[in-house]
Amino acid sequence: MNLQYLTHNTIDRQAWDACVAESPIPMIYGTTAFLDVTAPNWDGIVADNYRTVMPVPHRKKMGIHYAFRPVLTQQLGVFGKQADHVETVQQFIDFLSLHFRFAEIPLNTTNPATGRIYGTGVTHYLALDESFETISKSFTINHRRNISKAQKAGYIFAEHMQFDDLQTIVAESPEEWIKAIDKSYAHEMLMAIEILINRKVARLFAINNQQGVPVAMALFSEYNNQLNYLFGISNHEGKQNRAMFLMFSSIIEMYSGTGKQLDFEGSETESIARFFRGFGGLPANYAKIRINRLPAVVGFLKNKKK
């Protein structure tokens, strides 16, 4: 296998995207349109004239170049026809280690777990081949009850184009995870969301109350046969009235019968995983790899947020 490390400006974007589209599960995370927003100036590793590729988001801190997982990106790793070959994935990881002294990135669910693994992530998939009537039979009793509660509150599902409303909900949200993340990381994430919407790479949806005010919002991307949940959040009212249950029920109804696969994008947090399983989502694991050839005294990345 002939591997090359290509800097951003030397990548053949058309050939790259064609390769990603031929993956066992084509994922938007690996496309040039998505990477340009979430990891500007990303590089790539290419094998055999774009038969197989691996995105390399990278940054520099304290003089040390490192590869990292960008915002809104659950999975990366190796894409292309041979993305599910263990020898191929191992060669890409080994080649990456020649260019970076530190890297901490996820693979994807089609990549075999091999070499330099430090953890495992989980997502949940839901096939949208059948009618909504059939798919919704798999919803748990508790989920049906919560969907009904949101409906009785008079909530309405709609596509939403006002990014400012998302910023307002993020600022007001009682969600602990949004309060816990670094402010610069949150700013970077919101900037990426705005650009993805403006470039029509992703779509923003809302659950509105009877006054037409959003109480929950979620970002989804559509690529090939995949529908990815990228981000979601509720304000106090939406959380109290279970708006996010109605959000996912509405999305599933909207795409039922399309043959797409909904990727819930997580989660390793049991309460969130249980939420996804309640809609019928089935778990799928992916490996996380770490390359660390830094001196023991260097701990600049151990507690990083991004």
Image (cartoon, rainbow, N blue to C red):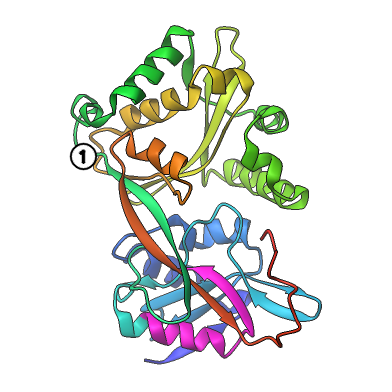
Residue at screen point 30% across, 73% down: 84
Give the quadrant of residue 286.
bottom left
Q: Is residue 129 visible?
A: yes
Image quadrant occupied by the N terminus: bottom left
Residue 115, percent from left and from top: 42, 82
Name above or below for residue 1 compared with residue 103. Answer: below
Residue at screen point 31% across, 80% down: 86
Residue 207, percent from left and from top: 51, 21
Name the residue tied to disc 1: 129
Residue at screen point 29% across, 78% down: 85
Q: Nearer the viewer, residue 39 or 9?
A: 39
Q: Nearer the viewer, residue 127 or 257?
A: 127
Horizontal side of 87 relative to 138 (left or right) equals right
Q: Is residue 108 visible?
A: no
Q: Give the tally of numbered discs.
A: 1
Give the quadrant of residue 16.
bottom left
Taking the magenta stretch, the answer to whether it contains residue 96 is yes
Taking the magenta stretch, the answer to whether it contains residue 262 is no
Residue at screen point 24% across, 42% down: 259
Image quadrant occupied by the C terminus: bottom right
Q: Which residues are magenta?
A: 89-107
Q: Amino acid at mark 1?
A: Asp
* Label 1 element class: loop
Residue 136, percent from left and from top: 25, 27
Q: Nearer the viewer, residue 267 or 195?
A: 267
